Amino acid sequence: MRILITNDDGINAPGLKVLTQIAHDIAGPKGEVWTVAPAFEQSGVGHCISYTHPTMIAELAPRRFAAEGSPADCVIAGLYDVMTDARPDLVLSGVNRGNNAAENTLYSGTIGGAMEAALQGLPAIALSQYFGPANKDLDDPFEAAAKHGADVVRKLLQSSLWDDADYRLFYNVNFPPVAADAVKGIKAAPQGFRRGTHFSAEAQTSPSGRRFLWVRGGAQDVPTAPGSDAAVNLDGYISVTPMRADLTDSAMLSPLQEALK
């Protein structure tokens, strides 16, 4: 199996090392793992592509490349520059430092990389490690993802739950904010919504007197609706959420048509 991996935390991020181990486990001794990751951190860029300027790419080692672009750029670079002899069988994005559950999903470059792979017609999985008091100070805060990641990916690959629809299915996996041995299991979960918390901006003045805004995230320990992604994560479970890039609210099409008559 040929696997392409990327992330949004950057080529030197510890989560990418964890993903590399997961990918090698899945690919097997005769498989190949190719890395194309951002040269610098690209958190929060979503599904952004560098449409109006070129992306520099550099080979750091065999099958290991850094690109000055977003995770979606990296997937495109992998498909159309790095792996032109044969497309990958699977694209993995992560392991993100922090959760990509609930509304975080909409901003996530990790999700953006997996989404681009799905739009290119490839099986794709995004993986993220929730951080919290029970795991942030561990010697390896990614240990839940490191221990359980390959098993989750293997279960998804062995299932028949893939398709070749125009907006192809991809998966969002979040590992709970606990030590590896405290993980209770895996649950399929819809994307949730954290009520009462959101991104905001905080103004600061630089020493030169210029005014800058820093974007601030909301509280991450707010549970979503029972059974949804962040709720099961905070309860110690790995969440797996099936996703598509199609943003249409299909249930509203008929009422909208009536309203437009």
Image (cartoon, rainbow, N blue to C red):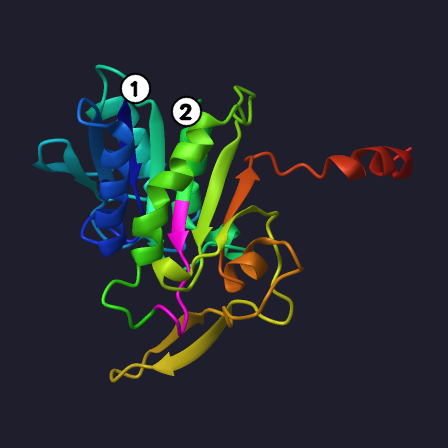
Gap in Å between the C-alphas at discs 2 and 1? 9 Å
Closer to the camera, 212 or 42?
A: 42
Report the residue at 41% width, 55% height from top.
Answer: 44
In the rendered image, the vertical position of residue 27 relative to residue 217, given as above or below: above
Query: Is 158 one of the magenta-colored residues?
Result: no
Q: Do residues under tags 2 and 1 come within 8 Å of each other at their CB atoms? A: yes
Mark 1 = which residue?
87
The amino acid beneath tag 2 is Leu
**Secondary structure state at the residue bearing disc 2:** loop
Q: Residues within 10 Å of mark 2 (few under 14, many from 20)?
A: many
Range of residues picked out in magenta:
127-135
Look at the image and tell me in which quarter the N terminus lies.
top left
**Secondary structure state at the residue bearing disc 1:** loop
Report the residue at 18% width, 52% height from top.
Answer: 12
Q: Residues within 10 Å of mark 1 (few under 14, many from 20)?
A: some
Mark 2 = which residue?
122
Dominant secondary structure of the residues highlighted in magenta in the image:
loop
The numbered disc on residue 208 is none
N-terminal-most mark, 2 or 1: 1
Look at the image and tell me in which quarter the C terminus lies.
top right
The amino acid beneath tag 1 is Arg
Residue 101, position as x, y percentages in the image: 51, 55
Residue 73, position as x, y percentages in the image: 32, 37
In the rendered image, the vertical position of residue 203 relative to residue 156, given as above or below: below
Apparent side of residue 223 relative to residue 214 in the rendered image (left or right): right
Report the residue at 52% width, 50% height from top.
Answer: 106
In the rendered image, the vertical position of residue 104 relative to residue 139, given as above or below: above
